[in-house]
């Protein structure tokens, strides 16, 4: 049944009495339920990044090219993105606990199959199975969390929940690097199996069932258009970094995505029971928090993607060394999550968002000094400053937006917000990677133009380098070619460093733009109470 606010009452397990609306599970029960959701979300998010480091090993084992192995990564992200919109309906229709249990089970089975894959094609199929389970875990968990906790306690709950969201993508490369280098690469999949089995039993015991008695007719065309639109959009944006915006394949996929998403919007506005209620976007606070958190995702995911490129290709670190260098920021982010959640419950999201984004901008501004001579300890310090800022922003802002969504629309709200953040993360990686590539070409051309190969100073430098090569036994012609190649390599190195610095300048600017957006967060009244609940300030 639903109450007058439209809130779905929790459905008790068979043989038990339904708990009334607003009744909270015992603290111990909530703790175990939180643990079950955190474990599942951590595994699902971890598998979006943990595979990256193992790609070269899988290429060798399966004897395939980079293009072929890329589908092992792409298939997972596309399926997750395509399934997110339907999770709200599935939870309302079949019950969120049931959907969660099935999702974890499918993810666990998919992980076991991935660990036993015998070819690249079988791995792709098994990754799709894994993604079918993993795609539903995050939005379904958020709905159950918001139903478990009243508004005044959701900040801390979301802070604890956010540990897995922030920690998983950052720790993935470190964990994967260690497994690939010292153990068996198949462990990156099989390690999920025992954890998944434990989590299923834990969730079955601790979670309460929630569903809506009359969720309405399934919005088939809304699902078809949204899934097709999101999958083609994510794929099209994902290949932009390699092929550019003007590439025919990119244009085709983005055109299909545009047509499908426009059709989806039209369908959702005219059907009686839309799969995603787009009227939620009329909610000022909800939409504003989506804009802020999406900006944070662009900053976070773009930097996580590009910084390893610099550390491995320019600084010469191994994958596991790169992972260990990035690990402290992940730990800081995880520690900041419950702190930010507790602060949100006391002071609201606005001060946390403003201060957090200012700290983030400052950390990014410092990182724009990155060079090949920068001590690793300094890089770690810069990244930890950024992690403090992002940690203050992410979960409080997201909680502030979701607190304004009516409880009976919570499933659609979490699905909509997760879909937008998924697209934002993909867009951030593609946009910043393409910007990095273009700026590197620009700086390389600019430095080459400034360097007159016929000037006396340049010729003198080349002659000195040439003499050093001749001193180790190269002939005059070989030494001259080596000297010119060395000078060209230094130009490319400096161009790469300057391009990376340009990216940090841009992301610092985005963080400042998010500061301005955060200023517009405002206070709303808690539903069912005359007392104001500080959501935005």
Image: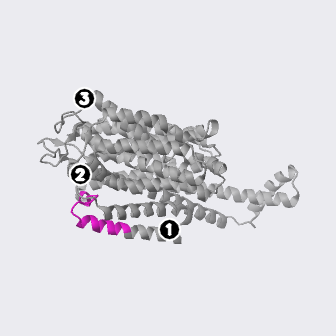
Residue 263 part of the magenta-drawn span? yes
Q: Is residue 311 left or right of residue 292?
A: right
Q: Which residue is mark 2?
A: 409
The rendered magenta stretch, by its main secondary structure, is classed as helix
Q: Is residue 525 in view from this perspective?
A: yes
Few, some or many residues within 10 Å of mark 2 (<14, 14–19, 20+)? many
Spatial CA span between label 2 and label 1: 35 Å
Q: Is residue 151 left or right of residue 81?
A: left
Q: Which of the numbered marks, if any, corresponds to residue 26? A: 3
Spatial CA span between label 3 and label 2: 25 Å
Residue lying furthest front = 15
Q: Is residue 355 in view from this perspective?
A: no
| Mark 3, secondary structure of its residue | loop
Residue 167 part of the magenta-drawn span? no
Q: Which residue is mark 1?
A: 250
Q: Earlier in the sequence, mark 3 or mark 1?
A: 3
The residue located at (59%, 53%) in the rendering is 120
Q: Tell me where the magenta segment starts and ends, as one range.
A: 260-280
Q: List x then y, in percent, for residue 341.
A: 31, 37
The residue located at (26%, 40%) in the rendering is 209
Q: Does residue 423 lie above or below 531 as drawn?
A: below
Q: List x then y, in percent, for residue 400.
A: 27, 46
In this rendering, the count of numbered labels is 3
């Amino acid at each position: 049944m639903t109450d007058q606010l439209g809130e779905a009452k929790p459905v008790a397990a068979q043989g038990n009495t339904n708990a009334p609306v607003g009744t909270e599970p015992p603290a111990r029960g909530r703790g175990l339920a939180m643990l079950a959701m955190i474990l599942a979300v951590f595994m699902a998010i971890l598998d979006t990044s943990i595979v990256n480091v193992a790609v070269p090993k899988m290429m060798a084992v399966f004897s395939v090219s980079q293009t072929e192995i890329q589908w092992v990564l792409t298939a997972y992200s596309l399926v997750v993105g395509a399934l997110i919109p339907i999770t709200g309906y599935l939870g309302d229709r079949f019950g969120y606990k049931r959907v969660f249990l099935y999702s974890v089970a499918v993810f666990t089975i998919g992980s076991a199959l991935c660990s036993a894959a015998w070819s690249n094609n079988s791995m792709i199929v098994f990754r799709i199975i894994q993604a079918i389970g993993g795609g539903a875990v995050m939005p379904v968990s958020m709905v159950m969390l918001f139903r478990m906790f009243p508004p005044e306690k959701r900040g801390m709950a979301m802070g604890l929940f956010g540990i897995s969201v922030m920690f998983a993508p950052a720790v993935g490369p470190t964990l994967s690097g260690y497994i690939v280098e010292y153990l068996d690469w198949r462990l990156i999949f099989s390690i999920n199996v025992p954890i998944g089995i434990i989590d299923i039993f834990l969730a079955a015991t601790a979670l309460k069932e929630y569903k809506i008695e009359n969720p309405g007719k399934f919005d088939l065309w809304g699902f078809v258009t949204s899934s097709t639109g999101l999958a083609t959009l994510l794929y099209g944006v994902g290949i932009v970094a390699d092929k550019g915006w003007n590439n025919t394949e990119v244009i085709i996929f983005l055109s299909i995505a545009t047509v499908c998403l426009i059709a989806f919007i039209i369908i959702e506005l005219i059907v009686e029971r839309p799969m995603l209620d787009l009227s939620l976007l009329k909610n000022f606070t909800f939409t504003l928090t989506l804009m802020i958190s999406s900006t944070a995702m662009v900053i976070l995911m773009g930097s996580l993607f590009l910084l390893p490129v610099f550390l491995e290709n320019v600084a010469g670190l191994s994958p596991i060394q790169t992972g260990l260098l990035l690990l402290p920021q992940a730990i800081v982010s995880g520690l900041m999550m419950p702190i930010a959640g507790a602060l949100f419950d006391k002071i609201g999201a606005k001060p946390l968002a403003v201060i957090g984004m200012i700290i983030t901008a400052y950390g990014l501004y410092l990182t724009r000094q990155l060079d090949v001579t920068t001590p690793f300890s300094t890089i770690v310090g810069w990244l930890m400053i950024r992690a403090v800022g992002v940690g203050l922003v992410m979960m409080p802002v997201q909680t502030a937006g979701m607190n304004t969504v009516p409880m009976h629309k919570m499933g659609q709200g979490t699905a909509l917000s997760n879909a937008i953040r998924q697209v934002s993360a993909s867009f951030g990686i593609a946009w910043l990677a393409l910007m990095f590539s273009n700026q590197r070409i620009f700086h390389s051309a600019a430095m080459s133009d400034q360097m007159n190969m016929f000037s006396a100073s340049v010729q003198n430098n080349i002659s000195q380098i040439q003499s050093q090569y001749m001193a180790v036994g190269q002939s005059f012609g070989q030494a001259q070619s080596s000297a010119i190649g060395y000078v060209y390599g230094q130009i490319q190195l400096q161009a790469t460093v300057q391009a990376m610095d340009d990216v940090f300048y841009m992301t610092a600017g985005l963080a400042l733009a998010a500061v301005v957006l955060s200023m517009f967060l405002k206070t709303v009244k808690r539903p069912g109470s005359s007392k104001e609940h500080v959501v935005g300030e």
